[in-house]
Amino acid sequence: MPEVGDKAPDFTLYDSDRNVRQMSEFLTKGRRTILAFFPGAFTGVCTKEMCTFRDMYGELEGLNGNLVGISVDAPFAQKGFAEKYALTFPLLCDFGRETIKKYGVVWNNLGGVQGYVCANRSIFVVDDAGKILFKWVAPEPGTLPDFEAVKKALQ
């Protein structure tokens, strides 16, 4: 599992519009990128988290932050999720579960469903050189992040 100070693992994932996106395109000079891993679109806690990020998106941008949501959902589910809740930041689809493995945020048997593997709720803040500046991993997927700590990590 990567730690603060490590280089963030690279990835290539589809977004909700079925476009291929790479980690490198989110590393913009002078900005920091928030990688928000979440278990699943349309689930209660995930909806609350992504809508909270949506509502504070302007503030994050003002702090030179980019936001990217990542789950194991298919692009079609991510698209419906983004449209239903007016999520304007990229939602990436790790349906192959390679990126959650690289970041060490795999959660097995979500909701007691044996064999269902998803992302544990977690946040990584990465600088423009790809260095991890902040890391938070939920003790269990139902725990929301400390949004103030995420904002602080952008400063």
Image (spheres, helix red, strand yellow):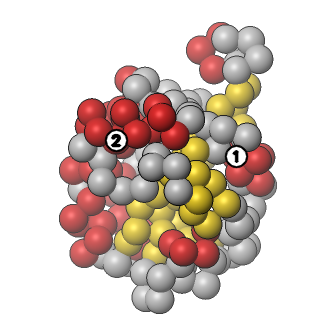
Image mark for residue 82:
2
Secondary structure at badge 2 equals: helix
- Can you identify the residue that label 1 sits on? 100
Image mark for residue 13:
none
Mark 1–mark 2 Cα distance, whole angstroms, equals 21 Å
| Mark 2 nearby-residue class (10 Å; few <14, some 14–19, many ≥20) | many
Residue 139 picture location, percent across and down: 60, 35
Residue 53 picture location, percent across and down: 32, 50
The mark tally for this picture is: 2
Return the residue nearer the eye: 91 or 39.
Answer: 91
Answer left or right for 58 relative to 82: left
Q: Residue at x 73, y 65 (%)?
A: 9
Answer left or right for 56 relative to 11: left
Q: Which is in the foreground here, disc 1 or disc 2?
A: 2
Determine which quarter of the picture holds residue 109. top right
Q: Residue at x 59, y 30 (%)?
A: 140
Identified by mark 1, the residue type is Ile
Q: Residue at x 67, y 60 (%)?
A: 12
Determine which quarter of the picture holds residue 144. top left
Q: Residue furthest bottom?
A: 29
Residue 11 picture location, percent across and down: 69, 61
Q: Earlier in the sequence, mark 1 or mark 2?
A: 2
Answer left or right for 31 relative to 107: left
Instruction: Look at the image and tell me in which quarter the C terminus lies.
Output: bottom left
Q: Residue at x 77, y 54 (%)?
A: 102
Relative height, residue 118 to residue 109 (above, below): below
Q: Is residue 122 visible?
A: no
Return the residue nearer the eye: 23 or 153.
Answer: 23
